[in-house]
Amino acid sequence: MPSSSSASDYDPACLPDLLPLYYRRLFPFSQYFRWLNYGGVQKNYFLNREFSFTLKDDIYVRYQSFSTQNELEKEMQKMNPYKIDIGAIYSHRPNQHNTVKSGTFQALEKELVFDIDMTDYDDVRSCCSAADICSKCWTLMTIAIRILDRALREDFGFQHLLWVYSGRRGVHCWVCDEAARKLSVAARSAVAEYLSLVKGGDETVKKVVLTDPIHPFIRESLTVVEQYFPQYALQEQDILGRKESVDKVLALTPEDILFTIKELQQDFQNEKKPENRWELIKDQASRKQGKKGHHFEKEIMLQYCYPRLDVNVSKGVNHLLKSPFSVHPKTGRISVPMDLKELDTFDPFTVPTISLICEELDRPRTGEEEEKVEDIKEKENEKDAAERRKIRDYKRTSLAKYVKHFDQFLDEMARLWKGELLRKSDLQKEF
Amino acid sequence: MQFMSRRKKYTNPQTELYGHALQFYGQPPLENISLTEFETFAVERLKLLKTVENLGVSYVKQTDQYTMKLDNESKNLNFPYRAETDDRKSQNGPREYEKQRKDHISHFILRLAYCQTEDLRRWFIQQEVDLFRYRFNVLSSTQKQDFLKRNNLQYNTISPKEKKALQENLVNSSYTISGIKVEGQDFYKVPFQDALDLVRTRKVYLKAGFVYIPHQEIVTIVLNDFRTRLSKALALTARSLPAVHSDERLQPLLNHLSHAYVGQDYSIQKNVGKISLEQIDSLSGKSFPLCMRQLHQSLRENHHLRHGGRMQYGLFLKGIGLSLEQALQFWRSEFVRGKVDADKFDKAYAYSIRHMFGKEGKRTDYTPYSCMKVILSNAPSQGDHHGCPFRHSDPELLKQKLQVYKVSPSGISQILELVKGMHYQLACQKYFELTHNMEDSSFSLSHPNQYFIESQRVLGGGKDIKREMDTSQRSQENSAARGSTSAREAAANTSQDLAEKTEDLDSFFQDA
């Protein structure tokens, strides 16, 4: 397996040379089309989908649309976009929107999406800030994914979720269920609000307030947070270590319980171990049982760990979001789908960069790989040589496992499409 | 609806339709009415809705105070207000019938006036939904069930077995449900898309895409249904509007009704170019409301503002008279001091500023945000500095900020009291009074640009800047009290023609 050291050889200046190679030989077009076509169940679904490209020199073009996979491929290979965004399915072909009577060109459907960005946690992480991430704060993403994935599946009943690494400092979730794609703006905003617990900007000190009774959703989320809190917050972020951090934590204790902070500050003189300090805090909270504000230790955990999502990203049906398999121009990393079965071992720093996978293309084949080539040859005798080579190409690189996971995701949805198509054709026969 | 001037014609009493306390406004009225009644009904309903709006900002909805005040207003304007306990007697009496009829007709007239733009529709729907919620809540349990049945709102109940299994979760999902209540009433299983308000506020148990609602809370579902129906109806009404507008008697009246709501929205730029960029720093301290002062300071300190802040502040600046060129220069010079280089600014941010001025995309000329909009929509999150400081800031931080801005300690406590009572606009007004050394500001604050204009007026002695706003804001406070008298006056003006009637309409919305 390739080591991560060659991944750090990415140089943004090389993009103009790497992108053509990426789009010609590595980008998984057939899976991509398979996804966005959604089995062809709904007419013109792919045709009316908006894409936007960011080209060299920051030139941004919207309302791109394509009628076939081939057209998409050709155009991308011609334009070599630095970034690709996916938008909504409109009432008409986006690339003809200027010909449509004003007011009738409308965004109709789109996946329900979520964007978790590490910068939104700057007030609660001490290891990094802004665009930087490290293995210590990455745990926040793990927690976010666990909480949101559970809620979207168990509470909302969604089943087809695609989690994608954004390429630098966050993750995206694409909810692809039909019901999700058809949600109104109001519904999307309601879902996002339901999932929001951390509220307030720079001017707000206490961003999480819990009142009785504690909703089952919050209980479930707390269970996840509690799992990670000791290691992540007490150890790695050391929130009860330095005086500065301690003060920040204590600032979240309720103000009407005047003595709490004083008591704790005194206790902390004698107790230096973070785990024990946390026990003291929990103790104070349980003593206030029944009184107002007695959930403050839960509120502290949530403020430091609970997912922060940008409601505006999820609300808009026409909102454009970075496409999976798009390249991040600053880091070179590919926005890869994430397999949640391996979530706890996911390391953003080992995600393949475009330079890595292009390099891997040039490597001579080993004996092992020759074998696989034979297998593939047997299976895909029908397709032409170029197609075959292309299929083999990404499989020779670190991108392979991510495309495989994407395939599995699509297979699950395909079962539904099959049923739908059968149902539709049955209905027609009943004519 | 057909109209015959000056003649009242009594049709068969629609007891079936008007025999109940509440309706969905599914069917339009089919009778003939006089122009006088047309006008009076419309104006009075508008007053009612304005009251609903004002009460909604000043009080927590559905509390006793709120309900009582709305009861009073409904009574004064002769709208149905509280189903009497003795159903049979009052529901079919002639007085009650009159109120129901007025309610029905006035609603449909206002649909005509408020279906034309997105903003008008949004406002109208919001107030009608609030009014409906208030009325539904005062119905008895039997009346509620009756209403549901009559309007075909079928939702499935869950079996006692399922209820038992979910009991703990049901109890923990809402502060109004106890274990006993779970056993004692039906629970409905409703797709979450039909109960968005409950989902949004997490006031309900949600599992596998369904919410479980106790019968006593079915109102939220009903409201959602009402909102959706009304929204669709307005869209349809908008299409038939050209036909209505071709009736010359109606068009001026309808236009006037919708402008009466909008009042001053500061969208038309007056005094363009009268403000120079050098003045902005000092103006921000003297004449900007706290929200804009905060945004300006943030911008100067960080050389950046996020989208929410750029919109709120940028549109405000447009409202006070900054031209597009000035705006571009202003934002560019600030952003360039930060991490953004000139090229990136021109590519990314300049577009959105031109968009604000209506020079790109849809070419909508965006209007500066009113206080209502700033307070109620787009709450700030981490890294944001927009919103209303009285609403969105921690009281401690707000206090510190006011201290830095040299507000007296007693003034600060007055402001904090108002904030505690959720009277954010009054708190801002108090801030105005304190910073301008005034006892009584004599205007009713509802818009940041209004704050600016009033401030400039006070500081400039009223000499250079002419009185921009009409007094529609102030009059809303007074009109509630004078409502009944003006209504009678209007009804008496049957012998005047429409032009004069329109003037009378003006008088409703100005100081008498």
Image (cartoon, coloured by chain):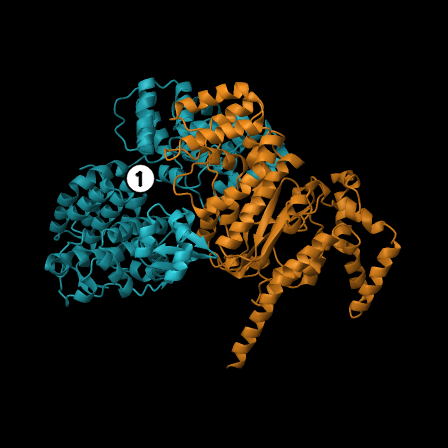
Chain colours: A orange, B cyan
Q: Residue at x 15, y 66 (%)?
A: B13
Q: Toward the viewer: B404 or B250?
A: B404
**Quick check: B419 above or below B476?**
above
Q: Which residue is mark 1?
A: B57
Which image quadrant: the C terminus of chain B? top left
Q: Amino acid at mark 1?
A: Val
Q: Residue at x 30, y 33 (%)?
A: B421
On screen, residue A371 versus residue B169, left or right, reads right
User: Residue B341: which quarter of the image?
Assistant: top right
**Quick check: B178 above or below B245?**
above
Rendered location of residue B34, percent (x, y): 17, 59
Q: Toward the viewer: B116 or A15?
A: A15
Rendered location of residue A414, percent (x, y): 62, 65
User: Is any atom of residue B35 visible in this view?
Assistant: no
Q: Toward the viewer: A318 or B5?
A: A318
Instruction: Give the SS element for disc 1.
Output: helix
On screen, residue B61 versus residue A389, left or right, reads left
Q: Residue at x 42, y 38 (%)?
A: A210
- To which chain does the residue with label 1 belong? B
On screen, residue B341 versus residue A256, left or right, reads right
Rendered location of residue B258, percent (x, y): 30, 49
User: Residue B175: which quarter of the image?
Assistant: top left
Which image quadrant: the N terminus of chain B? bottom left
User: Residue A28: which quarter of the image?
Assistant: bottom right
User: Is any atom of residue B155 visible in this view?
Assistant: yes
Q: Residue at x 31, y 29 (%)?
A: B418
Rendered location of residue B38, percent (x, y): 20, 56
